[in-house]
Amino acid sequence: MSTRQKLSEIAKAEAQRFYHGRVMKTEHNLHNIINLFTGWVIEEADGMWCAAFVYYCCIKAGFEIPKRPKECLSGSLAGCKSWEEWAIADEKITYYPVDENFIPEAGDIVLFNNVCIDHEHDHIGIIVENKEESIMVAEGNINNVSGIIERKKDSHIRAYIRLPDWYSYHTK
């Protein structure tokens, strides 16, 4: 099984575990996700952990990625914008701005604009299935909970990121 296929399966299973921040007067269960980022605490992460969920799934699938690749100018991979900075700068990664000819696959990472808030780089997830008019996406932090969401292929999609199978980050 390829690493990207494994990523898709892990993301689907992890999203269905019902990770959540502080919702419905319950304590969060995000320890596995936020503890990957030294010094990050629930007060900062609560309601802002979609990118950290993607990172957590990537690590669990076997991708070797540092928390903050040198290409990330805006912070760690706990932030959506950092994923784009890294993907554009690392020649081993394929970055696909929205293009009608691109066919997303399970295991691709998708970046969104204006999905959760009226802002660019506001959300990120992992594709678990591609359909003709939509994609099924494993996401963290959908109203502060994880889940599988069907998203239309529309203007909210900023770009896709395709990590090569068996990707390992090494600085030059």
Image: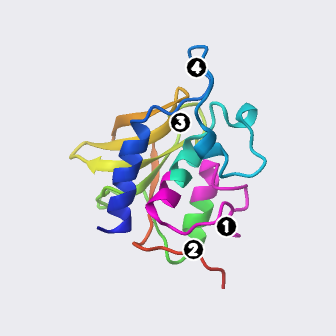
Contact, CB < 8 Å: mark 1 with mark 4?
no
Q: Position of residue 64 (x, y in %)?
A: 55, 69
In this rendering, position of residue 80 left or right of residue 100: right
Q: Which mark is residue 90?
A: 2
- Kind of residue indicated by mark 2: Asp
Contact, CB < 8 Å: mark 2 with mark 1?
yes
Q: Secondary structure at mark 3?
A: loop
Work out whether residue 90 or residue 33 is closer to the camera in this orientation and state it: 33
In this rendering, position of residue 50 left or right of residue 126: right
Q: Position of residue 171 (x, y in %)?
A: 66, 80
Work out whether residue 28 or residue 48 is closer to the camera in this orientation and state it: 28
Q: Which residues are magenta?
A: 57-83
- Kind of residue indicated by mark 3: Asn
Q: Residues within 10 Å of mark 2 (few under 14, many from 20)?
A: some
Q: Position of residue 139 (x, y in %)?
A: 45, 40
Q: Mark 3 or 1, which is nearer the eye?
A: 1
In this rendering, position of residue 63 left or right of residue 147: right
Q: Mark 4 or 3, which is nearer the eye?
A: 4
Dot 2 or dot 4: first in sequence order is 4
Dot 2 or dot 3: first in sequence order is 2
In three-dimensional space, the C-alpha distance between marks 3 and 1, rounded to whole angstroms, equals: 25 Å
Residue indicated by mark 3: 114
Instruction: Write the residue at 73% across / 55% down.
Output: 75
In three-dimensional space, the C-alpha distance between marks 2 and 4, rounded to whole angstroms, equals: 37 Å
Q: Mark 2 or 3, which is nearer the eye?
A: 2
Dot 4 or dot 3: first in sequence order is 4
Instruction: Write the residue at 39% across / 72% down.
Output: 165
In three-dimensional space, the C-alpha distance between marks 4 and 3, rounded to whole angstroms, equals: 22 Å
In three-dimensional space, the C-alpha distance between marks 1 and 4, rounded to whole angstroms, equals: 32 Å
Residue indicated by mark 4: 23
Q: Which mark is residue 69?
A: 1
